[in-house]
Amino acid sequence: MRRFRIVTGLLVAVLGLATTVTAFAGGEDEGEASSAAAEPAMEMASDAITGFDTYNLDSGRITITSFGEAPMLAAMVAEGSLPPVEERLPDNPQVMEPWEEVGSYGGTLRTTSLDPTWDPIIRHVANADLVEMLASPTAHHANLVGVEVRPGVFEDWSISDDGTSWTFTLRRGLKWSDGERVTTEDVRFFFEDIMENEDLYPNYPVWLVRGGESPEFVAVDEHTFRLDFAAPYGLLEVILHTHGSGGVGRTMKPAHYLKQFHRDYNDMDKILPVMKEKGFGDDEWPRFMLETGAGLMSWDGTYMMSVMEPLEFPVVNPWQVQEVVGPGEFLFVRNPYYFKIDTAGNQLPYIDYIRKSTAEDPEVLSLKILTGELDVEGGYFVKLSDYPLYVENQDKGNFDILLTKDWLDHPLIFFFNNAPSDPVLRDLVQDPRLGQAMSLALDRQDFIESLFLGFGRPAQVAPVRGNPMFSQDLEDSYAAYDPDQANALLDAMGLEWDANNEFRLRPDGERFTIPLTYYEVFPSVTPGSELASQYWKAIGIDVPTKVMDGGAWWTAFQANEHVLTTWGLGSASVVPSWFFQGFSTTTPTWWRWYQTGGAEGVEPTEAGKRVYELRDIIQSTPSAEERLAASREVFEIQAEHLWVIGVAVDVPSPLVHSRRLGNIGIAKDFYNITVLDGGEQWFFKN
Amino acid sequence: MLYYLLRRSLYMLLLLVVLSMAGFAIIQLPPGDYLNSYIQALAMRGAAPDEAELAALKRQYGLDLPLHRQYLKWAGRALAGDFGRSMDWRKPVSELIADRMLLTVIMNAAAMVFIYVVAVPIGIYAATHQYSVGDHALTVVSLTGLATPQFLLALVLMVFMVRQFGASVGGLFSPEYVDAAWSVGRVIDLMAHLPVPVIIIGLSGTAALIRVMRSGVLDELKKQYVVTARAKGAAERALLFKYPVRVAINPIISTVGWMLPATISGGTITAVVLSLPTVGPMLLRALRNQDMFLGGTIVMLLGFLTVIGTFVSDMLLMWIDPRIRYERST
């Protein structure tokens, strides 16, 4: 049960110059998928089409008689500056079913980000994944539970029975955007020449370390490689799939390009002039290397920053940088070697160019949307509070608004530090009744009305609907507004009221104060914190709020100075990565204890230890069922202890798109980032 | 005179060294460093910072070194004309600043010209027509200009331009000219986009300058030499420009020095609101993210321009006002 695949069979026929591919899609046994894909093609040159992956094809059978390509590429082919499309595509191009219809080529997509050095839209739109999800309402990029997983850059992948060894097959015939083949050498280069070089990376990335050791890379052949871990690592499949940890930029690098800058392959005499030209000091080779595209950070949209020269750095993404127009301004052009085609055999993407600009002020971004200067915007920078304004102006600006699901399932949550340095406070915080009382004290409907324009529904931090772990009981756990019960719980804890009946007193006689320290990580945290503070005052807990500078917050965090924090939670359904990240975030001493095997930090409570045990199971087990069971138990413990207090879920995020844009409007039930992930099949209607 | 120039130059050099140290230290004053800003930015994107990446960055950016060694590393290279690379933008600092310099200078110089062209005549008019309807009207306008927050004015004007003229929002170019090569069309496009930021940036400066000019001229007009000149039958206009205006303009000349750095970092808030590709917003961002090399270099540049500007205004004053002599009398 390691994965789902639809494709199972194929038939290849070659008639003269035209290529005919017929694929059957059906729900047969998974085991046969790989063998079928590996079947040799009939009478084909080296670029034989030997397999087919389809996207949710109900018809079960499609026939592709020839490949189509964009006019701008056809012109280059005619001119002789580009090989024909049949040679550019991999042996088995990935068929992506357009969400609504087969589109037409051309056009420039305009988008803006608020941050000149980072762009979430480009990050999702112009991105290729190692493994993919079938776009669906429950598909969330950090969520591999309950969705169909598809091949991407990886054609095949499997885990050994003991869970320690992963075998991956790269898509055969896949090429970088400069036409070079993608091979296991690119993966080897990443693992051995970059990650193992101590000057480049003093530590190995946490997500690749199991049992205290980095994995051993074994190239089986040109397309197949193995990662052998020191301990079972079933969760890797999920991680490969998230942008945060895995992804193309964190697994393979264009070795043929980067070797010219790597000192293991070249004399420093040759590299130094390039470094000098780019403003690096003579002793800054590691920094030069990482900023030239060898770095891990290339996943998050900042990869644009490290591009040496436009068009030079090879990618497998649908678009690549053509020109750096100015600081924060980029022009992207289609990658002529992109590996996906639509159901009619046309190479994707449909849109020729993406023009990405930067607005440093949110109001400018709003104005640009209102005047129809942007073709797509959403996911991060479009505020729900502006929704009425957009509705009012959508005809004038000729755009539509999708109220998509927000990648941030919980736009507002409150995290406890389970081991604050004040011992009295520590005992109180570790009593589950405190979290329960503080949760019961919140009138969630009021939050929904005043912060989220009435959208969303009250909920505790729990698996979201559509997730196999979803349970109404978990979502409702202490989520009702019941100040009487909250007071009863606090009374039972022995927290007396002071003489004025204004606040409760701690066992040591001091006023019961829990400082709420946060920074503006998401738009709703400041109003949310203020409102929550009032509700907690009503049950006698003094919660002064303090908004901090982000850098200062993290400094204080490292010093274990926070007790209660406001945050948001993305994909509560994925216990493994996201819940632990947050859970560990506010109890840095527990996390330290866990990471050092008990040598440092503070020993967690029994419940805390159990959660870390479950984390180990979730990470290691190759069994999806066992992983799910462990995840469910984590949420059951959370529902009782309420280390994280949730407020509401299903608060939508507006995604604005031009009415000229096709294959996007249907995706209104998707997560906003899932919509953006489908960028290669958007097109401009005539 | 030569001795004076030499002495001034030496002081200027010393001042610049101190400035660069102070700038570097001040950027480091808030708790944490660039990596903390990086982590918090990552969190907003919904990503967990990877410890391997942070460790690598810390070493490569030299953030694990003590502050004085970071400074020496930067200053040593700066002396050779190499200002290092920005951590935040991952580009050479000199390239980043150069990219924005031309437009910044054009915009702020235009704003300065606007200020002088508008403020000096109005100030003179207001002084010679004291308490007239015109004086009151101009006073109201200038005080309003002084009191209105620039960012608010920027937003209002921007919405107005978009609604009324269908201009593109923000920036100094229409989308079709952003990455075009320089051409007549592009220059015209720039001209069309300049008035809004120039007026906004210039307005508060104009208001202040009008008041300075007005009170200066008023003071002079009451003096006896003016009365004497009038009694001797000097023409009113010639008299006004030959004496009171020349004297009253002194405080304005002595602040010319401050205008030079303002051509680089002027109107930062306005530039942020209007999304102008100028140096001001870049400095603001560098300071907030503790991007030492970029922030330090811009602060250094501003210091340099202030020092030069002060020097220039001192020279101008000597030239315009014969009463001022810096050299010791022999």
Image (tube, rainbow, N blue to C red):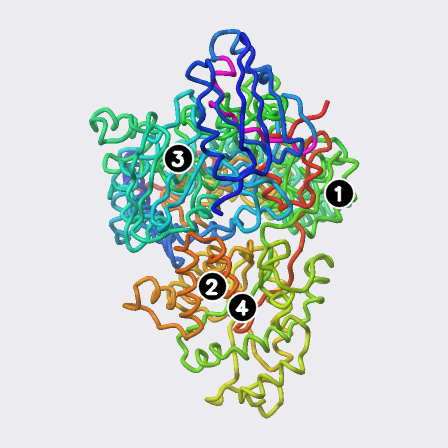
Was residue B278 drawn as part of the magenta stretch in this picture?
no
Disc 2 and disc 4: Cα gap in Å? Answer: 14 Å
CA neighbours of label 1 inside 10 A, class few (<14), some (14 to 19), many (20+): some
Element carrying mark 3: loop
**Visible residue check, residue A447:** yes
Name the side, left or right, on which A120 lies relative to A166: right
Q: Amino acid at mark 2?
A: Phe
Label 3, label 2: how many angstroms apart (C-alpha)?
A: 36 Å
Foreground of the two, B314 or A272: A272
Magenta extent: A84-100
Pick the residue in front: A344 or A409.
A344
Identify the amino acid type marked 4: Glu
Q: Quadrant of residue A426?
A: bottom left
Element under label 4? Answer: helix
Q: Residue B223: in sight, yes or no?
A: no
Chain letter of disc 3? B
Which mark's residue is nearer the viewer, 1 or 4? 4
Q: Earlier in the sequence, mark 2 or mark 4?
A: 2
The residue at which mark 1 appears reads as B134
Are tags 1 and 4 found on a single chain?
Answer: no
- B328 and A329: which one is in front? A329
Q: The C terminus of chain B is located in which quarter?
A: top left
Whether pointer 2 and pointer 1 mark residues with C-beta atoms closer than 8 Å, the reply is no
Rendered residue at 56%/58% (across/down): A568
